[in-house]
Amino acid sequence: MANKQFYGVIPPVVVPLDNERNLDVKSFERSINRMIEAGVNGLFIMGSSGEVAFMNDAQRYELLGEAVRIVDGRVPVLAGIIDMETLRVIEQAKRAQEYGVDALVATAPFYALGGPRENERHFRLIREACDLPLFAYDLPVCVHTKLEPEMLVRLGRDGVLQGVKDSSGDDVQFRWLVLLNEDAGHPLSLLTGHEVAVDGALLGGADGSVPGLANVNPCAYVRMQQAAEQGDWQKVKEEQDLLARLMWVTRGIVKEVGFGAGVGAFKTALWQMGVFDTNQMREPVQPLDGSDVAHIARVLAECGMLDPSMPLRTR
């Protein structure tokens, strides 16, 4: 594999905010250190789980600077450079590179949707503008474009891309991407964005995972990755079953949808566990409360992540 630096468990970091929606640096440091101590292989800053779509440039760069400072070279830092069009993405790439990150992660352009030719040119132009390892972020649910496996592997062979973070949810296309990547000599590091089907991706040949749920339980994802590397597929299944049940923190949320239900559930879980001091979200998304918080606490307790006798934390 050409990119051995980027493999294993690389959580997309969920970002704690205080009640005024400012970055909570102490909680951020606590969470990052907790994941590194659990044995993760890297951290993805400013992805979807980090609410990048809700941040202005000043907030992005404050976050990136604090993340690089806290990590202090202990694991690779991948930075999202996600924006609507190519020139803005290139600006994000150049700024991120100045902060000393180890790799960049970019989606296809969005809003003014292009076709396959425009998407390929987008990644080639980013490569011309910067020399850090570049991952394509396949996220059709948000950017409304599916990145084709043939194009991704071609860009890998040409040295444009060094990896793919696949959050398409399309397991068939991902399996074909794995096969085409192998046929080409494995130029790309392939990371699944699944939470509940990482076991299948690893069995199929993925190099690792980028699961938001690893913010809540990094240890289980690390154990699953290690078991896969050792060929202990029964252990892989056991860990994935545990994590699939833990992912129920996002099920049955009644007051929010989208980021509010998904990232909001992760933040609420971390808040109830004492890792975060609040479960605040970025505007205009509201934090979960009431019965949703109680539901998340019950799931945490059932999965051994929270003492059921402890009272709920409240705002």
Image: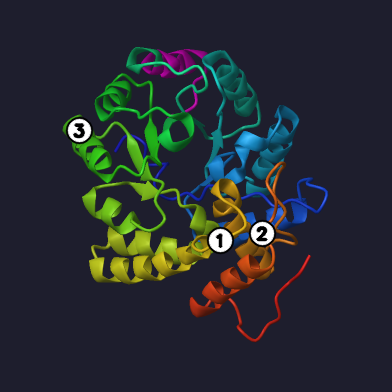
Q: Which mark is residue 288?
A: 2
Q: In the visual, does 218 lie left or right of 148?
A: right
Residues at circles 3 and 2 in contact by the CB criterion of under 8 Å: no
Relative vertical location of residue 163 with respect to residue 198 in this rendering, above or below:
above
Image position, residue 200 (x, y; %): 27, 55
Q: Which mark is residue 64?
A: none
Image position, residue 92 (x, y; %): 61, 23
Q: Residue at x 68, y 59 (%)?
A: 30
What residue sits right under mark 1 in the picture?
Answer: 253
Q: Amino acid at mark 1?
A: Ile
Question: How far is mark 1 from mark 3, CA to CA?
Answer: 39 Å
For the C terminus, which image quadrant? bottom right
Q: Residue at x 74, y 51 (%)?
A: 17
Q: Residue furthest left?
A: 183
Magenta-highlighted residues: 119-134
Q: How would you classify the magenta stretch by its main secondary structure?
A: helix
Q: Amino acid at mark 2?
A: Leu
Q: Amino acid at mark 3?
A: Leu
Q: In the visual, does 230 lie left or right of 128?
A: left
The answer to whether residue 83 of the structure is visible from this angle is yes
Relative vertical location of residue 230 with respect to residue 300 in this rendering, above or below:
above
